[in-house]
Image: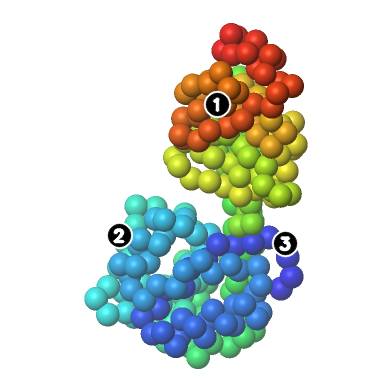
Amino acid sequence: METNFNVKAIIVDDEEFSRLLLKSKLEEYCSQVNIMELCSSAREAKESIQKIEPDLVFLDIAMPDKTGIDLLKELPELNFEIIFVTGFNSFAIEAIQLSAIGYVLKPIQNDLLIEAVGHAVQRIQEKQENRRNKVFIQNILNPDLSKKRIGIPTEEGLDFVSIEDIIRCEGYLKYTKVKLKSGKTLLSSYNIGEFRRLLENYNFYACHKSHLINLLHIRKYMKEGTILMEDNSYVPVSKRRKAEFLKVLTRI
């Protein structure tokens, strides 16, 4: 299965051999699936899902303490695709089939794994396309900056964030680090010039060839030509832009 679309995924199985075997098969046959973590219990998986926000979860049903079904019941939202990887060939499989959720029986057959992943990836792509379209409609109908959002391409796909939540962008090789109010950093495949083009009309200023800042998130400007941002980072202002930048500050 060859595609440039990458999917963030985790594997949940109490058996180490099963986790490693599935990871190996996915790396060999489903290269677009990026395994972020291997979890040995429902408790580990819950923490991982909340932290990583995966697109896809490979989930064993029968686990000690809590089952895969117990895990799903505990989550407030299921914003990811599920592929059950299980030894059960019983009523559980009938319930999975009726719900159009993917599953693979153990021992895993390569062709069935590839098919299940293909269906899941297609649904994930459709969700992102729908989300992209919704963001477009939202942006075009709302002049209010606080409601405008931007789709930021990363290795895992597209992250949609509010423009006002971006503190700054920093050029990094051919990529861009996007710093958010939440403390999260996104590494985008867009270069800094692309972000400059997209954001300069929304209170962003290119104070340096490698830095684009949100003027509304400035905490302090030092006379030597350094800006303290709300994420406690220090950003330089290039010498040739100091005079212009000072004028911009008076208009905030």
Front label number (1 vs 2):
1
Element type where label 2 sits in the image: helix
Q: Which residue is mark 3?
A: 4
Q: Identify which residue is drawn at 67% across, 42% down.
A: 171
Q: Residues within 10 Å of mark 1 (few under 14, many from 20)?
A: many
Q: Give whichever of discs 1 and 2 has the lower sequence position.
A: 2
Which of the 4 quarters of the picture holds residue 86? bottom left
The answer to whether one can see residue 160 in this image is yes
To which residue does mark 2 refer? 74
Vertical order, 146 against 175 (above or below): above
The residue indicated by pointer 1 is 227
Q: Secondary structure at mark 3?
A: loop
Closest to the observer, 228 or 59: 228
**Residue type of the residue flagged with mark 3:** Asn
What's the CA distance linking mark 1 and mark 2?
Answer: 44 Å
Does residue 168 appear left or right of residue 66 in this picture? right
Q: CA distance from mark 1 to mark 3?
A: 38 Å
Quarter of the figure that contains the N terminus:
bottom right
